Image (tube, helix red, strand yellow):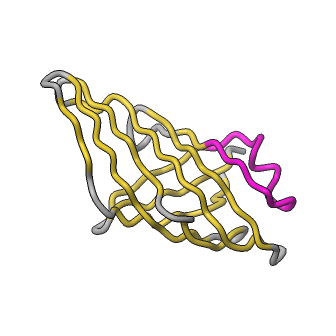
Amino acid sequence: MRLLLTIHVTLTGSFDVNNGTEAVVMLPFTGTAEGEFFTGKTVGSGVDTQKLENGSLKRLSARYMLEGRDYTGAECRIFIENNGPSLDACVPILVTDSKALAHWQKAALVSEVTPTEKGVDVRIFERD
């Protein structure tokens, strides 16, 4: 697998609802992105939504947009939606206006989410 991008996420709050059986937690965040192919930061804030049943995590979904420069020096944006049942099983979907990174939109991608002191680091990889 080839590392495409690392996003350093900083959590900025938490909102939740719990009916005793199901709970939903929304975690707004900001962040910076770095890598060989793109460098930038979040546009506004993103949100990570976690759905739980009987206290067990059932589904994660994060949505956010990055703005910065691709490896050619062109300004661009990347929208990322990262979904999965756990931190180690999320699949990102990307949309970008970068011509140089356009192939990412159809690539087989996986992510690795690692907790940090202020939030998480998200590493997005392209499968071989």
Outermost residue on the left side: it is 20
Question: Can you give x and y, in whole percent of width and height, for residue 118 in the image?
Answer: 31, 68
**Residue 39 percent across, percent down from the top left:** 65, 73
- 28 or 103: nearer the eye? 28
> Residue 73's x, y, as percent?
81, 78
Q: Is residue 110 above or below residue 77?
A: above
- Count of picture labels: 0
Q: Is residue 100 magenta?
A: yes
Compared across the picture, whether 29 is left or right of 124 comes to left
Q: Residue at x 26, y 48 (%)?
A: 15
Let me know if residue 70 is in the magenta part: no
Instruction: Place residue 91 in its image quadrant.
Output: top right
Q: Is residue 20 above or below residue 79?
A: above
Over which residues does the magenta segment extend?
93-109
68 left or right of 99 in image: left
Name which residue lies at 75% across and 66% down.
Answer: 76
